[in-house]
Image (cartoon, helix red, strand yellow):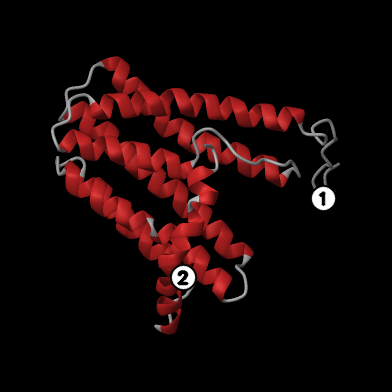
Amino acid sequence: MARLLSVHGRKPAAVVLEPLAAGLLRLGLTPNVVTLLSATLSVVLVVTLIPSGHLVWAAALAGLATTFDMVDGTMARLRGGGTKFGATLDASCDRITDGATFAAITWWLIYSYDAGAPLVAASFIVLIASQVISYVKARGEASGFTMVGGLIERPERLIIGLTGVGLQGLGVPYAIDVAIWVLAAGSIATVVQRVVMAWNDPKAGEGIAPPAGAA
């Protein structure tokens, strides 16, 4: 399940993504431009539609916008491979859109849903943990660890969160409550899971070289 959406789910999606990516390349767009455009669009949609209560539109349009997160990678592959800057830009934009999405949900919970303190706290946990999950993986990989998989990764996080938002907008009672609590529990478990991955890595006990020029 951990890699179902983020890896296996991309194979059938390639039927749509590859022609779209090829078309964008023919228009002269680069993967980095598409990364910035998709991130900007996603942020604008969630911070305007969710706090204003347009939950169904927010879920549908933000979900559509996030598909471009896979398009830029497909574009890079069709061009023969991505760049280190492109990977850094993509990861940075992912963190921004994640933060904006769950900040907007938390805002709506507080000011429109009149959520109780436990649900608001759970939403803050999701907001913070979404950043920590990605950071632990990035820092671990920078240390040479193998950090593969995780219970709640970014695709699962966005799908569960936006589905909860959309169902709540359609009138399904407590849909957002269930989504937030599932994400909070799953996100905490994923942070622990990835720290354990780092702990168990064969390279975990290796020393860290001091920075160049250090006394």
Q: Quadrant of residue 40?
A: bottom left
Q: Which residue is mark 1?
A: 212
Answer whether labels 1 and 2 touch (C-beta < 8 Å): no
Q: Please give the name of the residue rendered at 82% of the width and 38% of the height, measured from the top-left corner.
A: 208
The quarter of the picture where the C terminus appears is: top right
Q: Quadrant of residue 183?
A: top left
Q: Quadrant of residue 126?
A: top left
Secondary structure under tag 2 reads helix
Q: Which residue is mark 2?
A: 18
> Which x, y percent locates residue 81?
62, 70
Count of marks overlaid on the render = 2
Instruction: Tell me the tag on residue 114.
Output: none
Q: Please give the name of the residue rendered at 36% of the width and 37% of the height, measured from the top-left corner.
A: 160
Which numbered disc, 1 or 2, marks the residue that appears first in the sequence? 2
Closest to the camera, between mark 1 and mark 2, is 2
Relative horizontal placement of residue 4, taking residue 169 as reference (left or right): right
> Which x, y percent locates residue 38?
37, 61
Spatial CA span between label 1 and label 2? 43 Å
Q: Please give the name of the residue rendered at 47% of the width and 43% of the height, measured from the top-left corner.
A: 154
Secondary structure under tag 1 reads loop
Kind of residue at disc 1: Ala
Q: Is residue 131 above or below residue 213?
A: above
**What is the crowding at mark 2: few (fewer than 14 residues within 10 Å), some, or many (at least 20)?**
some
Relative horizontal placement of residue 157, taking residue 147 as reference (left or right): left
Q: Please give the name of the residue rendered at 82% of the width and 44% of the height, measured from the top-left corner.
A: 214
Q: Is residue 12 above or below residue 108?
A: below
Kind of residue at disc 2: Glu
Relative horizontal placement of residue 172, taking residue 211 as reference (left or right): left
- Of 8 and 25, nearer the camera is 8
